[in-house]
Amino acid sequence: MGLQQNWCGMNGIMFFSNELFEDAGVEGKAARYATSGTGAVFFLGNIIASFLMPHFGRKTLFQMGTFGMGVCSAVLALTMVFKDEVDALKYVNVVVSLMIIAFYALGPSK
């Protein structure tokens, strides 16, 4: 569990989210607002996970969070490759990055 927490790339998303969003094509204040959204999503995700823990168990939430992070990371990688061809992908990148954080809060951060 500790290995997954360190190798999942969450530190990269949390600490470099402003650069990640600017590289995806979100500029100026919008990138800063998206960066602020990362903290809000992480906070809300942890609150929701604390209510789900008694119902589903730690192992199930860990597996669901890890699977969700993997799928979202693959989508993020693909959308970053094609971001210059389709303008709307910059918004997809922001949403997928926030989903990665939400899945991390759901399981692996516990």
Image (spheres, rainbow, N blue to C red):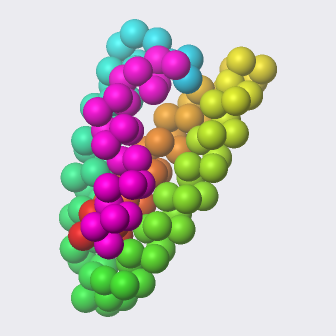
- Along the line of sight, which residue is nearer the eye, 87 or 24? 24
Location of residue 107 with respect to 71 vertically, above or below: below
Q: Position of residue 75 (x, y in %)?
A: 64, 47
Residue at 25% x, 88% y: name it.
54
Highlighted range, magenta:
1-23
Q: Quadrant of the C terminus?
A: bottom left
Residue 43 magenta-highlighted: no
| Residue at the limit of the structure toward the right, as seen here | 85
Residue at 50% x, 35% y: name it.
94
Residue 13 magenta-highlighted: yes
Residue at 75% x, 23% y: name it.
86
- Along the line of sight, which residue is nearer the eye, 59 or 53? 59
In the rendered view, does 54 fall on the left or right side of 108? left
In the rendered view, does 87 fall on the left or right side of 90? right
Q: Visible in this render: residue 48? A: no
Q: Quadrant of the N terminus?
A: bottom left
Quarter of the view holding residue 82:
top right
Location of residue 105 with respect to 100 vertically, above or below: below
Quarter of the view holding residue 103:
bottom left
Q: Position of residue 74 (x, y in %)?
A: 63, 50
| Residue at the limit of the structure toward the top, as seen here | 28
| Residue at the limit of the structure toward the front, as seen here | 3
In the rendered view, does 19 fall on the left or right side of 48? right
Location of residue 56 with respect to 109 vertically, above or below: below
Q: Position of residue 61 (x, y in %)?
A: 38, 77
